[in-house]
Image: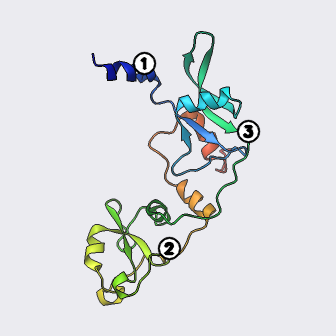
Amino acid sequence: MTADFRTSFVREPNSLRHHPALVLNADYRPLSYYPLSLWPWQEAVKAAFLDRVDIVAEYDQVVRSPSTEIRIPSVVVLKDYVKPQKRVAFTRFNLFLRDEFSCQYCGAKGDLTFDHVVPRARGGVTSWENVVAACSPCNLKKGSKSLRQLGMSLRKTPRQPGAEELRNMGRRFPPNHLHDTWIDFLYWDAELEA
């Protein structure tokens, strides 16, 4: 048995590896939807111990120290409100999120890159209003030509999204795993069944 294996086993047993905690702001809304605001269970336990969060829901599993036993938090709420950012950073991820992870020329999903609508070789700038998500085939086809030259068109006009708009867009792309205790906090404005 190698020392690395023993160390990783002691520090994080497999049974506890996948117990993230959903982190909610003081208003009970997730800090972010995409990516979903999650902490490893160790951070959630530490924050609870330091009285920085309230535990709202827990997993069935427990962690123990010589003097304490605590159920692993599955949902925690920050005691102090964190003001959401108003400015949206111009990043590849945010651009793909704005364009709903689809090519703005053909609608294809996956294998995305970004494309300058007005090519840089023709004076186009790198900005929210001139850059779109594009699949590799469309990007290669377009090259440094104009849309009119190729008879191509955009699915929607590129523009800078607002922070709230991007947060709401992120809600459309839930992660692969949603724990049962998270659902009420992720879809808090969904219509209730009668």
Check the image and report above or below for 71 versus 126: above
Residue at image mark 2? 128
Q: What is the spatial separation of the Cα atoms under label 3 and label 1, in whole angstroms? A: 31 Å
Under circle 3, the secondary element is: loop
- Residue 181's label in the rendered image is none
Q: Sequence order check: which comes first, mark 2 or mark 3?
A: 3
Label 3, residues with CA under 10 Å away: few <14, some 14-19, many ≥20: some
Check the picture and name the quadrant holding the C terminus.
Answer: top right
Which residue is located at x 45 percent, y 78 percent?
130
Given residues 40 and 100, the one toward you in this image is 40
Could you say where residue 188 lies in the image, as x and y percent from the top left? 66, 47
Which amino acid, mark 3? Lys
Check the picture and name the quadrant holding the N terminus.
Answer: top left
Which amino acid, mark 1? Val
Residue at image mark 1? 10
Could you say where residue 137 lies in the image, as x and y percent from the top left? 26, 70
Given residues 194 and 152, the one toward you in this image is 152
Residue at image mark 3? 79
